[in-house]
Image (spheres, helix red, strand yellow):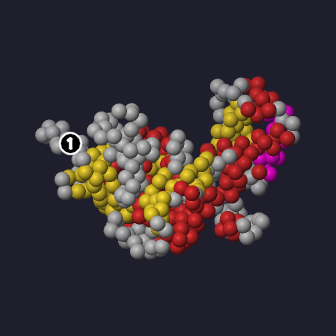
């Protein structure tokens, strides 16, 4: 059987979802094997969430994998390196949807992603977690809205669909087992959000072998629930060998959290939700998503199945995405619709916008290489420099950090081309990045 196929496990009893841990405790009789949720692709006409990442039907009787999944290890390493700049979310959670026809609000969806990433930093341990309120404060103007979002998550369940002991089954998992809401909700950022996940939801994350790597700065800028869900799916798929995803219409509706009974006509569903979500995602994400008409599967005049294609952006388009994220949100929708050539609002000095992530740094450097080549900076020197990230300086400005493959490269760039690079970076970033630092191999970071 192909070794690339994946299998994940989640603790479910004979009757459905449960909050039991799948690992038997020491000194007790061996527990019954955990129920299996296998990656799969639904046959034509079926409704189900596609959690198969290779785009091919999953074979039967797959061998079990180690219960310690890759997702937990990646989440812990990512949190240690990036904090909340990048968020790791299990693919099974990305392709789940709220139960009972309900849906999570946009603030609740964003907060849940921060919660999952925090738990992943500690191997999804079953414990009471503490999330600093300042992490999510940018999208909530008061404590009441923050704890209302937590309550919304607490009252929700997620549905994961897949084969279960030889039969196609529906696993419904509660998300939170508890949370703490202080009686005196003081408007201070030092307050914390205390919460605990259910055992079943933790096991889903802990045993996962596949994940989505979300950009925190990009995610918080998304303004619709439909776009956020499409962004999560795209971030999980766009760098894969087979990045296309084929879905029946009912599954697409559920994945994008379209309210039950709304937009029953596909034409209205497309114009009100899908097209708008794709436009916003294409403006902010490192990939482009398209839904080609020629890939529609029809039965008579009725459209029964669509295909979403995810493609990584070219360097110049990725650089434009970086600059769009750096611009003020005012006028973003107008720029997306092409109603204005340029609409900038003054960027307040306090608070400063979040630092761009590593993907943005790479996109900025790719655009800078094009511009510097036109200014006669030697191409071999540019190829010998790699973007590390964007950091604050002691003076409060921002700098692009470049790592040189050789010490002589760093010295040559610093002596002969630093002024030109600073000018180009300032121009490309609309003045937000005005300095550059060259780090030679084997040397410690300069103070």
Residue found at the very far front of the displayed protein? 300
Q: Which residues are magenta?
A: 413-427
Image x and y of residue 1, in percent: 35, 33
Q: Is residue 422 magenta?
A: yes
Image x and y of residue 210, in percent: 43, 43
Name the element at disc 1. loop
Q: Is residue 435 visible?
A: no
Quarter assignment of residue 358: top right
In this view of the protein, which residue sits in the foreground, 438 or 364? 364
- Is residue 304 shown above or below 38? below
Estimate how packed mark 1 is, as few (under 14), some (14 to 19) or many (20 or more) residues with alpha carbons within 10 Å. Answer: few
User: At x 39% / y 33%, what residue is drawn?
Assistant: 2
Image x and y of residue 423, in percent: 82, 46
In this view of the protein, which residue sits in the foreground, 414 or 1? 1
Q: Which residue lies under the disc numbered 1?
A: 33
Q: Main secondary structure of the magenta part?
A: helix
- Is residue 190 shown above or below 5? below
In the picture, measured across the screen, residue 302 lies left or right of residue 196, that is right
In this view of the protein, which residue sits in the foreground, 50 or 317? 50
Quadrant of the rendering where the C terminus is positioned: top right
User: At x 80% / y 51%, what residue is drawn?
Assistant: 427
């Amino acid at each position: 059987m192909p070794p690339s196929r994946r299998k994940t496990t989640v603790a479910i009893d004979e009757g459905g979802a449960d909050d039991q841990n799948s690992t038997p405790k020491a000194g007790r009789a061996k527990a019954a094997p955990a129920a299996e949720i296998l990656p799969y692709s639904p046959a034509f006409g079926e409704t189900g969430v596609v959690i198969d990442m290779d785009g091919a039907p999953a074979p039967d009787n797959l061998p079990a994998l180690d219960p310690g999944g890759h997702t937990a290890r990646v989440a812990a390493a990512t949190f240690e390196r990036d904090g909340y700049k990048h968020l790791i979310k299990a693919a099974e959670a990305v392709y789940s949807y709220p139960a009972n026809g309900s849906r999570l609000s946009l603030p609740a969806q964003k907060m849940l992603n921060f919660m999952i990433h925090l738990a992943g930093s500690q191997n999804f341990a079953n414990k009471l977690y503490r999330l600093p309120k300042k992490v999510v404060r940018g999208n909530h103007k008061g404590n009441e809205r923050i704890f209302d979002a937590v309550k919304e998550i607490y009252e929700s369940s997620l549905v994961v669909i897949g084969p279960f002991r030889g039969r196609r089954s529906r696993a419904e998992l509660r998300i939170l087992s508890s949370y703490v809401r202080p009686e005196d909700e003081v408007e201070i950022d030092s307050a914390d959000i205390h919460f605990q996940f259910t055992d079943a939801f933790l096991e889903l994350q802990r045993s996962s072998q596949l994940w989505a790597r979300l950009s925190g700065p990009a995610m918080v800028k998304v303004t619709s629930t439909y776009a956020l869900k499409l962004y999560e799916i795209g971030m999980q798929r766009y760098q894969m060998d087979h990045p296309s995803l084929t879905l029946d219409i009912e599954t697409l509706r559920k994945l994008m959290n379209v309210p039950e009974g709304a937009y029953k006509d596909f034409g209205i569903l497309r114009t009100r939700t899908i097209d708008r979500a794709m436009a916003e995602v294409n403006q902010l994400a490192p990939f482009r998503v398209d839904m080609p008409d020629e890939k529609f599967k029809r039965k008579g005049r009725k459209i029964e199945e669509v295909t979403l294609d995810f493609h990584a952006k070219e360097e110049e388009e990725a650089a434009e995405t970086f600059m769009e994220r750096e611009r003020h949100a005012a006028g973003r929708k107008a720029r997306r619709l092409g109603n204005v050539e340029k609409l900038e609002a003054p960027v307040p000095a306090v608070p400063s916008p979040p630092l761009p992530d590593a993907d943005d740094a790479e996109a900025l450097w790719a655009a800078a290489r094009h511009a510097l080549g036109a200014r006669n900076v030697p191409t071999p020197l540019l190829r010998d420099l790699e973007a590390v990230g964007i950091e604050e300086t002691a003076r409060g400005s921002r700098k692009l950090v470049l790592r040189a493959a050789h010490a002589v490269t760093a010295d040559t760039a610093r002596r002969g081309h630093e002024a030109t690079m600073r000018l180009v970076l300032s121009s490309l970033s609309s003045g937000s990045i005005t300095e550059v630092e060259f780090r030679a191999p084997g040397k410690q970071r300069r103070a």
